[in-house]
Image (tube, rainbow, N blue to C red):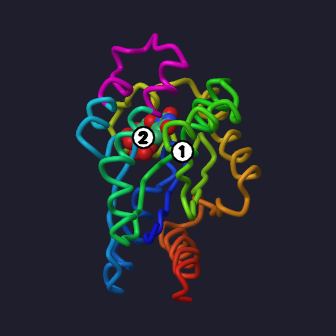
């Protein structure tokens, strides 16, 4: 495939979405063809699945159902959005991807990182990011940030207990260890500007600009 798939990962409130926006802007200014997208969602059917997953009315959802829905939405997203863009030689910037499933469903929900990884490979037909940037903050900091930003309205995953968010954090550290070449971790507790610069440095180096 001619393009490059770069994914941004992080626990809730890590600030990865503003980091990805800064990367998009810089790459576009440098003349690269960029497609920005996000998960869960990123194509019409995938967005519909997103609504089911994040609906606060679905609180009793079984963990495997949740993992399968994320994988189903990912499959749609790849087929309709990501693969065509990569085939056209674009840089695809994706806010969350397979590593979210490994940290949230694999580790935090206890399904097992390897099990969720293999189930996802069926959905993605082996497509993995070329580069992943993981922005990590301690869960207490992340949740305090999103509670402030959303003024109290949290989706189903965000409303989980602090114990779950601690596990997500631990899960990301375990996933990073497992894929330490592909996943570059940065400290999301630094200032916004420092975090952006750290992420830009990694991306520009990866594409041979620095
Ligand atoms: P979203 O509002 O898009 O979160 P954020 O702004 O934090 O990226 O909600 C996505 C939620 O879904 C988030 O809590 C992480 C979770 N998630 C999983 O549990 N597994 C997955 O595979 C993905 C893609 C997301």
- Residue 11: percent from left, percent from top: 55, 44
The residue at label 2 has a CB less than 8 Å from ligand 1 = yes
Report the residue marked by disc 1: 98
Query: Is residue 38 covered in magenta?
Result: no
Report the residue at 38% width, 56% height from top: 83
Report the residue marked by disc 2: 74
Label 2 with label 1: CB-CB less than 8 Å: yes
Label 2, label 1: how far apart the Cα atoms are: 8 Å
Q: Is residue 166 above or below residue 86?
A: above
Q: Residues within 10 Å of mark 1 (few under 14, many from 20)?
A: many
Magenta extent? 51-71
Q: Nearer the viewer, residue 93 or 15?
A: 93
Q: Quadrant of residue 113?
A: top right
Q: Nearer the viewer, residue 5 or 87?
A: 87
Query: Is residue 52 covered in magenta?
Result: yes
Q: Nearer the viewer, residue 39 or 59?
A: 39
| Tag 2 secondary structure | helix
Indicate the quadrant containing the C terminus: top left, top right, bottom left or bottom right: bottom right
Q: Residue pushed farthest bottom?
A: 210
Asked whether, in this view, residue 22 is left or right of residue 186, the answer is left
Q: Nearer the viewer, residue 176 or 160?
A: 176
Q: Quadrant of residue 190?
A: bottom right
- Residue 35: percent from left, percent from top: 32, 64
């Amino acid at each position: 495939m001619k393009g490059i798939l770069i994914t941004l990962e992080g626990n809730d409130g890590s600030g990865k979405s503003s980091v990805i926006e800064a990367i998009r802007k810089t790459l576009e200014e440098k003349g690269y063809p960029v497609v920005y997208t996000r998960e869960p969602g990123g194509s019409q059917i995938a967005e519909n699945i997103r609504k089911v997953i994040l609906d606060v009315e679905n609180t009793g959802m079984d963990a495997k159902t949740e993992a399968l829905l994320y994988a189903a939405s990912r499959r749609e997203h790849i087929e309709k959005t990501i693969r065509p863009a990569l085939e056209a030689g674009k840089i695809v910037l994706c806010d969350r991807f397979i590593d979210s499933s490994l940290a949230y469903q694999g580790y935090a929900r206890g399904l097992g990182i390897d099990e969720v990884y293999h189930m996802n490979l069926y959905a993605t037909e082996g497509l993995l990011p070329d580069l992943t940037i993981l922005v990590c903050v301690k869960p207490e900091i992340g949740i305090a940030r999103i509670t402030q930003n959303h003024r109290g309205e949290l989706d189903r995953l965000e409303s989980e207990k602090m114990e779950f968010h601690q596990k997500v954090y631990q899960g990301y550290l375990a996933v990073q260890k497992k894929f330490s070449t592909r996943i570059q971790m940065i400290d999301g507790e630094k200032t916004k500007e420092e975090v952006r610069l750290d992420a830009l440095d990694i991306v520009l180096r990866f594409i041979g600009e620095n």
